[in-house]
Amino acid sequence: MGCFLSFIFFLLGFANWGFWVLAVLFLFIGRASKPSSSSQTVSKNPEIVPDDLDNILQSLSQGEIKDPVTQETFRSGQKVYLCHTHRLAYHEDSWQEMGCRCMVCGHNRNTRDYILPTPIQITRNKTNDLIQWDDLK
């Protein structure tokens, strides 16, 4: 935007002195609105971990989600690389093949490695011990 305005002011500036006044005014306003480097603070945000991280890892270990590169399912106990932003998980070989970065983000700043948990198995005979709707009446 600044280059475009400068170009227009340059072309039209020789024809009318009012354009030079506007050019100086725009440059002054543009510089005044930018924060100076001394007042700028760099805030390091802690890594954002999804609230439902346990659910994502459980879904991965149950084979509900596949590796986007190889389309292989994940198994419990495997090491996976999970991008928190796009919620994509990669096997170790896929992660290496992608250059250790998310295929959507293009970097690895939001990616961590996890060991998939063992899914909780409820046996059929234990389901009878669970609270039934009739028990609540």
Image: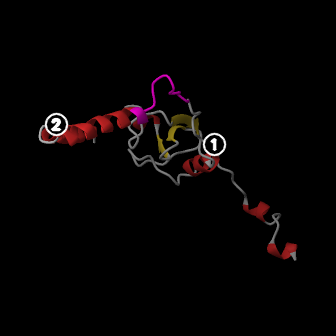
* Residue that protrudes farthest toward the front in the picture: 17
Residue 125 pos. (x, y %): 77, 62
Asked if residue 3 can be seen in this view, the reply is no
Q: What amino acid is at disc 2?
A: Phe
24 and 86: which is toward the camera: 24
116 and 53: which is toward the camera: 53
Q: Residue at x 57, y 35 (%)?
A: 47
Identify residue for label 2.
Answer: 10
Q: Which residues are magenta?
A: 32-43
Q: What amino acid is at disc 1?
A: Pro
Q: Nearer the viewer, mark 1 or mark 2?
A: 2
Q: Residue at x 28, y 34 (%)?
A: 24
10 relative to 40 in the view: left or right: left
Identify residue for label 1.
Answer: 117
| Residue 68 included in the magenta stretch of the image | no
Dot 2: what SS? helix
105 and 43: which is toward the camera: 43
